[in-house]
Amino acid sequence: MDSEFEFELQVCAWAERHWPPAGGDDRPVVVARQLGTGSRRWDTIVLVCDPEGLAARGAFGERRLDSDLLHVVRHAPPTWAWYREALPDPGYPWRYVREAVHRAADRGVIERRKRNGRVQLRRLRPYPDWVERVIAVENKPDLDAAAARALRPQLRHDVALALADEVWVATAEAGGRVEPALLEDIPVEAGILTVVPGDRGADATRVVWRPRTLPAEETGTRILENPAGGGHDTSAARFEYAEPDWKARKRLEIAERAYERGWRSYADSMRPDCRYFELRPRPEVARPYCVAKDCHQTAGECAGSCPAFEPEPPAWRQGEWPVDGGPGAGVKRLLERQRSRRRPGTE
Ligand code: SF4
């Protein structure tokens, strides 16, 4: 295994083809990576989708609908109406809603017109209920005692908040078992999955522990501070409640970002314009490879701050490399093609 990043890509590729781990469910999934809320980012997200809902979501375009656009699109009426009468009070100034109405109309997801100086809107189609389950996966290829301890507060946070329906830890299969002592540090509500490194076949994973379904539609608990414990620590935990409405909105916002980004968008933050950047084909999906470092580099390494970065020579941009604009631009287009090919509902 080259790195956690490599492992993460493997888990994404596997999940896209074979989720759920036990099989027996052929509902479509959308897989994305490194998404969540401001306070918590999940490594891998699997959205289990309603097939018809997902197809209907495709009619709203490939780009995400942000929270303001969702407010407009979800409540747009079937007949013309003044936006202030048609939409629920947003809890923030109406001028932002008016801007969102214009943005939505410019993107072709609602209709807009002006009557007697008032902006009216009408929906083109209902926004579908397309997300059935949100699954969060934490990837820890080397789940040793220290990693399990470090993971515990994050998983407890996830379980208490219950923003996702299920929380899993994926780890590399080492000799076919996970040490029982490590399991004690993982909350019982979280599932544990072992993955055979480098294998993305249907049998590449094994469920060590089944997760509990979390009450995603109920009030959750946001843990703000958790005392370390021990004999001298008498401080109390601090927490606040997360209302079901807030959770439903966050889930949909995360789902919209996942729909737009998928899991192949890592090259957006890497340097395919570096002369050492290559995509080396693996089964199913090409992986970034750094010729200078002779390894599959992580997205963090392959950034503007990389000391080994060298811009691709200008001649590469004019030569006969099979795509216009040089390898850097070509690599980005290749990944974009892979991304849209895999995004259900846009094929
Ligand atoms: S040298 Fe640095 S920037 Fe260039 S491909 Fe390698 S990791 Fe990326």
Image (cartoon, rainbow, N blue to C red):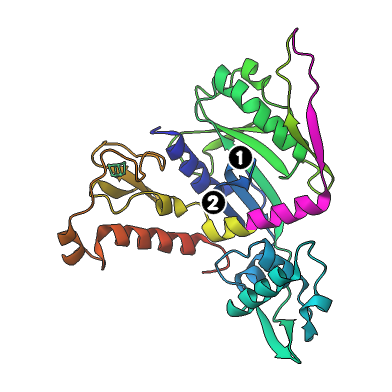
Depth order, front residue of 297/301 = 301
- What amino acid does circle 2 point to? Arg
* Residue 94 position within the rendered picture, expressed as x and y whole percent measured from the top left: 75, 70
Q: What residue is rendered at 34% in x and 39% in y?
A: 296
Residue 209 visible here: no
The magenta stretch is 231-255
Q: Residues within 10 Å of mark 1 (few under 14, many from 20)?
A: many
Q: What residue is rendered at 71% in x and 34% in y?
A: 157
Q: Is residue 306 left or right of residue 299?
A: left
Residue 236 belongs to the span the image colors magenta: yes
Depth order, front residue of 154/56 = 154
Establish whether ligand 1 lies closer than 8 Å to the Cβ of label 2.
Answer: no
Q: CA distance from mark 1 to mark 2?
A: 16 Å
Of the image marks 1 and 2, the number of the one nearer the N terminus? 2
Q: Is residue 243 left or right of residue 4?
A: right
* Residue 23 position within the rendered picture, expressed as x and y whole percent measured from the top left: 63, 46
Q: Which mark is residue 105?
A: none
Quadrant of residue 146 within the rendered picture: top right
Residue identifier under label 2: 17
Establish whether ligand 1 lies closer than 8 Å to the Cβ of label 1.
Answer: no
Q: Residues within 10 Å of mark 2 (few under 14, many from 20)?
A: some
Q: Which quadrant does ligand 1 occupy? A: top left
With respect to residue 286, does 122 lie above or below? below
Q: Which mark is residue 137?
A: 1
With respect to residue 78, does 204 lie above or below? above
Quadrant of residue 239 within the rendered picture: top right
* Residue 343 position within the rendered picture, expressed as x and y whole percent measured from the top left: 53, 62
Where's the N terminus, which quadrant?
Answer: top left
**Outermost residue toward the bottom?**
116
